[in-house]
C-alpha cells in the first residue's frame, strides 16, 4: 500500500490548486467558470475516492499468474506437488499468493501472515529457515527463501499424522526383574516361595495383562515384555505405580523384594535393542533396583522411581566371590595401578591405600595414581600427619609417571570410589588400547561408566568404598599389611561419607568400623582430624545465614565467593540439622577451577541424586553434587529451583 501514499499527496495538491483557481475566478467575477470548475472538482474527488476505496478493498492484486512468471510447466509442477507460494512486504502482509490458497479456501491477500500462522514470526525474525505451523487443524511446513520475501508452503498434515501414529505403534521391548528374588529362592522354604509367587509374580502378571502387553517368563524372577509406545506412555502416565504395588506387597510379607523394569525402543534393529536392555539392566541393578529405566535409541536413559534406599542385598557369598576374582586378576597381572577421582577425599584415598596394601601382600608392585591431583585439605593434613608411614609403604605417583611404567598388556588398573573416566586421576591410562580395568565403587552407576571393565563391583547399598574394601580384605586369605595410617584414613572415609554415621548406614557399616578399629584405626583421634579451622567455620556460618527456605521443605544457600567443595558439602550437612528441612543445597564457586558448584544433601526422605542428575551431575540418594562452568551461581540457583519444581509436579 505504501507506494500508493504518493497518490494521496497528488489529490490534495490538485484540490488546493483548483480551490485557489476558484477563488481567482470569483475575484474576477467569472461565476460560470467558478461553478464549472467546482463541479469538475467534485466529480474528480469522487472518482479518486472510489478508486482509492477499491484498491483498499481488493488489494493491489496485480493479475500475475504463476504460468506467466514461471511458465506453464512450473505451474503444473507446483500443483502436482501441492506447493503454495506467498510474497510479502516489510509489514509481513501478503502482497501476492498463488492459486493454491484460493483452491484451499485460505484468504491471505493483504492480511498479516502472522494472523494465519502465529509462529511464522520466527521466519521473519530470521530465527529459522523453515517452520511447522498449524491452522484450522491443518499442519503446514513453511520455508523461507533466503534473502527474499518469498515463502513456500506445503501441507504436511497427513505425513504428520502418519508419523505420530507410527511412533505410537513403535515396538518397545522390556525386561521386568524381581530384585533379590533369587536370594529368597535359595534360602526360603517352599511355602514362602509359593506365597511370593502368588502375591508378587501374580500382581506383575495381571498388571501386564491389564495393559495388554505380551509377556514371557525367562527365569523365576525375570520376564520379557513386548508392548508399543502407546502402552508405554500409558504406564508412564500412571507413574509406574506397579513399582509401589510390588514394594507394598513385599513389605506386608516382610521380604525385601522390589521390581526393576527396563524398556528400550527407537530402532528397528533388534540386536541394538538387546544391547540397550542389557546395559539398562546393569545400570538399574547397580543403582539399587526398585525403579524403571527407559531408553530411546540415541537419547540418554531416563530413570523413574527409586524412591527407597535399597537395604543391603550384598550377600556374604558375593563378597567372597568378588574378593577371589579380584585377587585372581591381580595374581595374573603385572603391576597394579590404583586410580582415584579428582577432588580426592578420605574415602577415595583410604580405599586406594588399602588396595595398594592388598596388591603388595600378593607380591605385586602397586602404584597409587593420586599425586598432584587436587584433594580435600583436611585429607592433606591427615596425610601430612602420617607422612612417614605412607611414604615408606606406598608409591604415590603422578599420571605422567604411571604412563611411563604402565604396560597395558600385562598391568591392571583399579578404579576406586568412581566409575566415570572423566573424573578419574588416570584418564589417559584408561584411554589406552587393551587395558584391563576393575571398578570398586559405591556410587549409583550413571551412564558415563568406564568401557568394558573386567570386574565392576558397584554396590550402591554400601556407605562408602572403605566399607566395601574392608569386607573384601577380610574375605581374602592373605595377610595384608594395614596399620594405623591406612585404617584411620579409611575410617575417616566412612565417617565423612555417612555424615558421622548419620545417613546411609547399615549394620554392615558398623561391622566395617569395627574391622577398621581392629586393624589399628585411631577412632579417638579421627574426629579431631575433622575439626574445622576458624576461617572455614566462619565462612560456613556466613553462608548458612544466607540460606532461604524453598517450597517449604528445602533450604538453598548461595555464595558468589570461591570456596572448597568440602565446605559446600559441610554447609549442606549443617543445614540439614534445621527442623523440617528435607534437603539442603549449597551453591558456590569452586576455588580450584572457578566453576559453579552445588552440594546437595537430604535427610534420607528425598532423592537428591535425581535432582542433581537432572542438572547433569550425580551422586547418591542422600548426597549428590553438580558442577558447571556454563552458569554463574545465581543462574545455577534458578536452574535448581526449576528442577525442584518440575520434579514436584511430576510426583503429584
Ligand atoms: N560433578 C559431579 N558430577 C556428578 N556427580 C558428582 C559430581 N561431584 C560430586 N558428585 C557426587 O556427589 C556426591 C557428593 O559430593 P559432594 O561434593 O557434595 O561431597 C563430597 C565431598 O565434598 C565431601 N567431603 C570430602 N571431604 C570432606 C570432609 N573433610 N568433610 C566433609 N565432607 C567432605 O564428601 C563427599 C564425598 O562424596 P562422594 O564421592 O561419596 O559422592 C559425591 C559424588 O558421587
Ligand atoms: Mn569420594
Image (tube, rainbow, N blue to C red):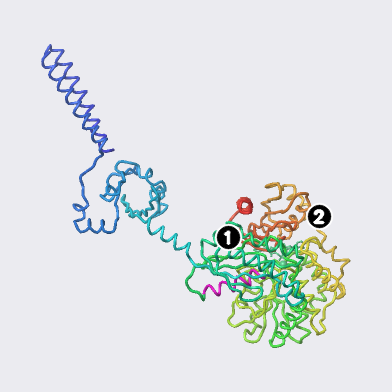
Q: Is mark 1 within 8 Å of ligand 1?
A: no
Q: Is residue 169 left or right of residue 82?
A: right
Q: Would residue 581 be counted in the magenta stretch?
A: no
Question: Dot 1, how many residues are within 10 Å of its Cα: few (below 14), some (14-19), or many (20+)?
Answer: some
Name the residue at 72% across, 53% down: 584
**Residues under labels 2 and 1: Cα distance?**
54 Å
What secondary structure is the stretch in magenta mostly built from?
A: helix
- Quarter of image, res 173: bottom right
Magenta residues, as a range? 272-285
Please say if 302 is above or below 224: above
- 315 vs 493, nearest the viewer: 315
Q: Which residue is mark 2?
A: 534
- 423 vs 235, nearest the viewer: 235
Q: Which residue is mark 1?
A: 235
Q: Position of residue 622 (x, y in %)?
A: 72, 60
Q: Nearer the viewer, mark 2 or mark 1?
A: 1
Name the residue at 18% across, 28% down: 47
Q: Quadrant of the N terminus?
A: top left
Amino acid at each position: 500500500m505504501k507506494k500508493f501514499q504518493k497518490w494521496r499527496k497528488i489529490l490534495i495538491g490538485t484540490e488546493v490548486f483548483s480551490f485557489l483557481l476558484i477563488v481567482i475566478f470569483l475575484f474576477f467575477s467569472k461565476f460560470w467558470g467558478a461553478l464549472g470548475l467546482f463541479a469538475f472538482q467534485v466529480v474528480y474527488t469522487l472518482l479518486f475516492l472510489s478508486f482509492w476505496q477499491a484498491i483498499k478493498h481488493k488489494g493491489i492484486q496485480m493479475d500475475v499468474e504463476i504460468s506467466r512468471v514461471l511458465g506453464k510447466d512450473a505451474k503444473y509442477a507446483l500443483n502436482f506437488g501441492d506447493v503454495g507460494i506467498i510474497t510479502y512486504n516489510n509489514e509481513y502482509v501478503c502482497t501476492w499468493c498463488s492459486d493454491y490458497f484460493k483452491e484451499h479456501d485460505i484468504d491471505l491477500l493483504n492480511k498479516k501472515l502472522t494472523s494465519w500462522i502465529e509462529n511464522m514470526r520466527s521466519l521473519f525474525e530470521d530465527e529459522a529457515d523453515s517452520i511447522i505451523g498449524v491452522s484450522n487443524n491443518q499442519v503446514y511446513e513453511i520455508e523461507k527463501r533466503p534473502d527474499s520475501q518469498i515463502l513456500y508452503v506445503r501441507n504436511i498434515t497427513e505425513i504428520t499424522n502418519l508419523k505420530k501414529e507410527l511412533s505410537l505403534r513403535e515396538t518397545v521391548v522390556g525386561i521386568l526383574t524381581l530384585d533379590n528374588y533369587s536370594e529368597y529362592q535359595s534360602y526360603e522354604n517352599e511355602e514362602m516361595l509359593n506365597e511370593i509367587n502368588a502375591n508378587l509374580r501374580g500382581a506383575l502378571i495381571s498388571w501386564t495383562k491389564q495393559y495388554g502387553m505380551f509377556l514371557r517368563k525367562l527365569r523365576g524372577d525375570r520376564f520379557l515384555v513386548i508392548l508399543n509406545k502407546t502402552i508405554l506412555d500409558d504406564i508412564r502416565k500412571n507413574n509406574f505405580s506397579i513399582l509401589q504395588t510390588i514394594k507394598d506387597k513385599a513389605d506386608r510379607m516382610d521380604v525385601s523384594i522390589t521390581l526393576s523394569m527396563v524398556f528400550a525402543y527407537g530402532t528397528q534393529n533388534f540386536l541394538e535393542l538387546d544391547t540397550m536392555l542389557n546395559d539398562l539392566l546393569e545400570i538399574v541393578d547397580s543403582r539399587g533396583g526398585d525403579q524403571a529405566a527407559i531408553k530411546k535409541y540415541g537419547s540418554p536413559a531416563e530413570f523413574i522411581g527409586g524412591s527407597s534406599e535399597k537395604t543391603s542385598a550384598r550377600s556374604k557369598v558375593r563378597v567372597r566371590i568378588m574378593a577371589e576374582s579380584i585377587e585372581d586378576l591381580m595374581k595374573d597381572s603385572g603391576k597394579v595401578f590404583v586410580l582415584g577421582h579428582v577432588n580426592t577425599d578420605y574415602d577415595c584415598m583410604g580405599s586406594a591405600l588399602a588396595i595398594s596394601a592388598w596388591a603388595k601382600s600378593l607380591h605385586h608392585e602397586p602404584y597409587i595414581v593420586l599425586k598432584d591431583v587436587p584433594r580435600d585439605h583436611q585429607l592433606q593434613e591427615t596425610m601430612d600427619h602420617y607422612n612417614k608411614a605412607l611414604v615408606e609403604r606406598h608409591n604415590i605417583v603422578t599420571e605422567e609417571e604411571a604412563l611411563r611404567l604402565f604396560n597395558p598388556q600385562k598391568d591392571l588398573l583399579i578404579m576406586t570410589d568412581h566409575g566415570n573416566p572423566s573424573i578419574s586421576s588416570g584418564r589417559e591410562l584408561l584411554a589406552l588400547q587393551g587395558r584391563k580395568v576393575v571398578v570398586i565403587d559405591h556410587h549409583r552407576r550413571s551412564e558415563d561408566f568406564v568401557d568394558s571393565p573386567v570386574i565392576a563391583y558397584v554396590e550402591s547399598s554400601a556407605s562408602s568404598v572403605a566399607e566395601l574394601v574392608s569386607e573384601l580384605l577380610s574375605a581374602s586369605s592373605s595377610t595384608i599389611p594395614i596399620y594405623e595410617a591406612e585404617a584411620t584414613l579409611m575410617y575417616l572415609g566412612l565417617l565423612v561419607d555417612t555424615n558421622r554415621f548419620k545417613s546411609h548406614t547399615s549394620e554392615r557399616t558398623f561391622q566395617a568400623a569395627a574391622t577398621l578399629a581392629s586393624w589399628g584405626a585411631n577412632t579417638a583421634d579421627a574426629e579431631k582430624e575433622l575439626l574445622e579451622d576458624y576461617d572455614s567455620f566462619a565462612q560456613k556460618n556466613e553462608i548458612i545465614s544466607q540460606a532461604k527456605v524453598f517450597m517449604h521443605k528445602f533450604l538453598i544457600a548461595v555464595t558468589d565467593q570461591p570456596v572448597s567443595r568440602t565446605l559446600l558439602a559441610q554447609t549442606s550437612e549443617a543445614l540439614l540439622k534445621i527442623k523440617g528441612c528435607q534437603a539442603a543445597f549449597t551453591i558456590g564457586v569452586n576455588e580450584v577451577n572457578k566453576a559453579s558448584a552445588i552440594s546437595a544433601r537430604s535427610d534420607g526422605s528425598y532423592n537428591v541424586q535425581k535432582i542433581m542428575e537432572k542438572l547433569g551431575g550425580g551422586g547418591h540418594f542422600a548426597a549428590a553434587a553438580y558442577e558447571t562452568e556454563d552458569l554463574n551461581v545465581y543462574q545455577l540457583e534458578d536452574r535448581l529451583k526449576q528442577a525442584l519444581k518440575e520434579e514436584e509436579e511430576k510426583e503429584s
